[in-house]
Image (cartoon, rainbow, N blue to C red):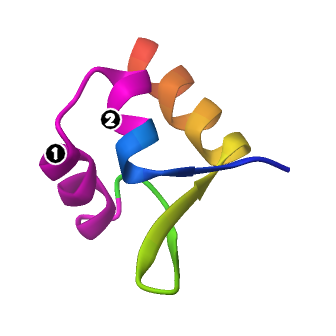
Amino acid sequence: MKFYTTKEISCILGLSIKTVQKLIRERQLQAFRVDGRYLVSEDILKEYINVRKV
């Protein structure tokens, strides 16, 4: 399973890193912390993208 950092997600979604962090903080994008960094699984990211398209 692949995991993405906030920087990678910002590039994929075309959003700023701050916006991605806000989405995580507001629990609109599910993430977990490892060594002080937020990581999002590929499955969660795909689900978020699919929901955004609707």
Q: To which residue does mark 1 refer?
A: 19
Helix, strand or loop at disc 1? helix
| Amino acid marked by disc 2 | Ser
Q: Looking at the rendering, which quadrant does residue 8 occupy? A: top left
* Number of on-image labels: 2
Helix, strand or loop at disc 2? helix
The structure residue drawn at horizontal position 44% and vertical position 24%, both measured from the top left corner, is 12
Residue 7 in view (yes/no): yes
In the displayed structure, would residue 24 be above or below residue 20?
Answer: below
Instruction: State the extent of the magenta-drawn residues as a range.
Output: 9-27
In the displayed structure, would residue 52 be above or below residue 27?
Answer: above
> In the visual, does 33 lie left or right of 13?
right
Which SS type dominates the magenta stretch?
A: helix
Q: Residues within 10 Å of mark 2 (few under 14, many from 20)?
A: some
In the displayed structure, would residue 37 be above or below residue 22?
Answer: below
Q: To which residue does mark 2 refer?
A: 10
The structure residue drawn at horizontal position 42% and vertical position 38%, both measured from the top left corner, is 9
In this view, the residue in front, 29 or 6, is 6
| Amino acid marked by disc 1 | Thr
> In the visual, does 38 lie left or right of 20?
right
Q: Earlier in the sequence, mark 1 or mark 2?
A: 2
